[in-house]
Image (cartoon, rainbow, N blue to C red):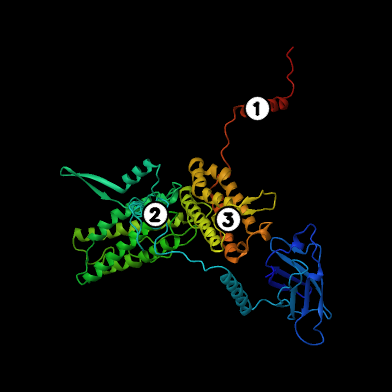
Amino acid sequence: MAKQIKIVHCIATPTAALVYLSEAPPAAIATPPNLDASNFAVRRAYPGASSQAVTVALNPNYYDKDAITVTLQLKGEPPLKVGDLISVQGKNLLTSDTPDTEVVFIKVNGAESQAEANSRRATQAFEDGVAYPVMTENVGNPPSSSYGGGTGTGGAGVSGSGSLPLAQLATQTITNVLGWKPKDDDAKGFVGALTQSFSLKDVEGHVESTWTPRTYAVQTDLAGGISGAQASLFTRANEALQQSLPLLDGLYALNPDSDAEMVTALKDIVSSQFTELVNELGYPGGPRISRVNQYFYLLLGDTLPSTSTIGISVVSDPDKIKGTLGKLRNELQLQSFSHYVNTIEDEQDITNYRILSDYLTSLAQSWVNNVGFFGLDTKKAFLGTQLVLLSRQLSVIGETVGEVRFALDSVFIGQSERQTLQLEFGHGEPAMFLEDVLSWTEAFAKDEGPQLIQNAGKLGVGDGFIPVVKKLETLVGEARHPKNIDDLPDGYRTIRVKHAMKDLEDQLAELARMAGEVSLQNPPKVFDYDEIVSKIHEEINKAAQKAGPVKARA
């Protein structure tokens, strides 16, 4: 069957029509382009006296090579009106002996109906599905780990559906226990994480170890973690939690009629909410504002702002606190100067409650004062927090490269073919093989980029990291619509491949945006001795000129 170009979509106004083609006609990409009006037929699509053809003309800049569209100038007698139904057909778009395109119907200035859009998408999906196999992947085994172990067999040869390879299981367990991601060449980091996660104590001639979960420990390949405002909040919150839990456990009811089961339940709820609040404040990449505000609301009954707000004060009076802590106070009758107080011990019980409430309210006030440093759209994020987000984005790009390869495999463009599939770029970029673009992107996301940030910090992000990311973004964007797209396999032009490439381009653009927030915009100026001396001489000369000539004494 002869190769045929299709009209995939069309938009019309009373004087023009924009025609989207499945691929570029050779005449359109020639130098100069030599399509003409005879390559398109436009007619009114309803019967009657006015069902004649519509005159078509082409302006000099009628073809858009990036969108693969042709703009037709229309002139109807009588003129076309909004709502008119017209038909558009391409004629001999490849060669003089190739068949015409199928007729496409479109309303003038009429938006595509939902039914028409669904029909068009269904047709494209059906054609794609018939031509190529359905994209499937084995999900019986978990994905391979970057720390050894394949998808089927672990380091000790243990495998099976639904079970982790031993190497991956060991790595995941170490990561969960130490709050630190293992790296082959980072023995110092391992010792530090081990020291932070376990405390040793001599007990009757032997050493006992106690595990302390470190949710704030390093979690990324970029040595990012919590720093700045988050480190301050988490350290304070963690100390408050350690001091508050014994006080909470020791609270007792002054009212003899209190329900013991209700008191126990309220204590458990307060303990759980306080613990989860502290864990969230140590969340890698910055605490999620909605979750922190939710726990403060549950504990104190006070709605806190989600953005930096001046003049907001948290209710700090223990007798006016609402939420779970207020319910516990009412159940235990721990109000100040409660008429149930009879002894010093009873008053100490109220004091312990006030200390507990002060810990939480002061922590809430600190959160209100620092919430502007958090959030995805903040302009004042600290480096440690941003490095966690950068590490996540680099991991996403590495996965997206794999998804692009998977999509290419599904349309019969395998690894060997990708290594010989030449892409010709515009804007002065030299041609590259497809696999070279993908392998460069993957290597940068996994090795080159993280190493650059680790070694050079913020200055390296601005001078070395961002330029490479933008270059890769440009190359991937060019790879979606290369100049020689007509010479590439048909599978390369399928929707699934285009979507996968577009996703990779978008992820690289997001990485560039995030890196821009970390880069050092105005690096400190290096001390220049010669420049300082030169400025001193300039100032001396200016002062001398201002003073004028010195008269000699008689």
Q: CA distance from mark 2 to mark 1?
A: 51 Å
Question: Which residue in the structure is indicated by mark 1?
Answer: 534
Determine contact: label 2, label 3, CB under 8 Å. Answer: no
What's the amino acid at mark 2?
Gly
Q: Is residue 32 left or right of residue 447?
A: right
Mark 3, Cα crowd under 10 Å, few <14 / some 14-19 / many 20+, is some
Q: Which mark is residue 282?
A: 2
Where is 303 relative to 482, above or below? Answer: below
Question: Which residue in the structure is indicated by mark 3?
Answer: 417
Element at label 3 = helix
Determine contact: label 2, label 1, CB under 8 Å. Answer: no
Q: Nearer the viewer, residue 499 or 539?
A: 499
Where is residue 128? Give x, y as percent: 58, 70
Q: Which mark is residue 212?
A: none
Where is 451 relative to 277, above or below? Answer: above
Pick out the residue farthest to the bottom.
48
Residue located at (61% from left, 75% from top):
123
Mark 2, Cα crowd under 10 Å, few <14 / some 14-19 / many 20+, is many
Q: Nearer the viewer, residue 321 or 377?
A: 377
Q: CA distance from mark 1 to mark 3?
A: 63 Å
What's the amino acid at mark 1?
Ser
Residue located at (70% from left, 51% from top):
427
| For marks 1 and 3 on the same chain, the one whose residue lies earlier in the sequence | 3
Q: Quadrant of the N terminus?
A: bottom right
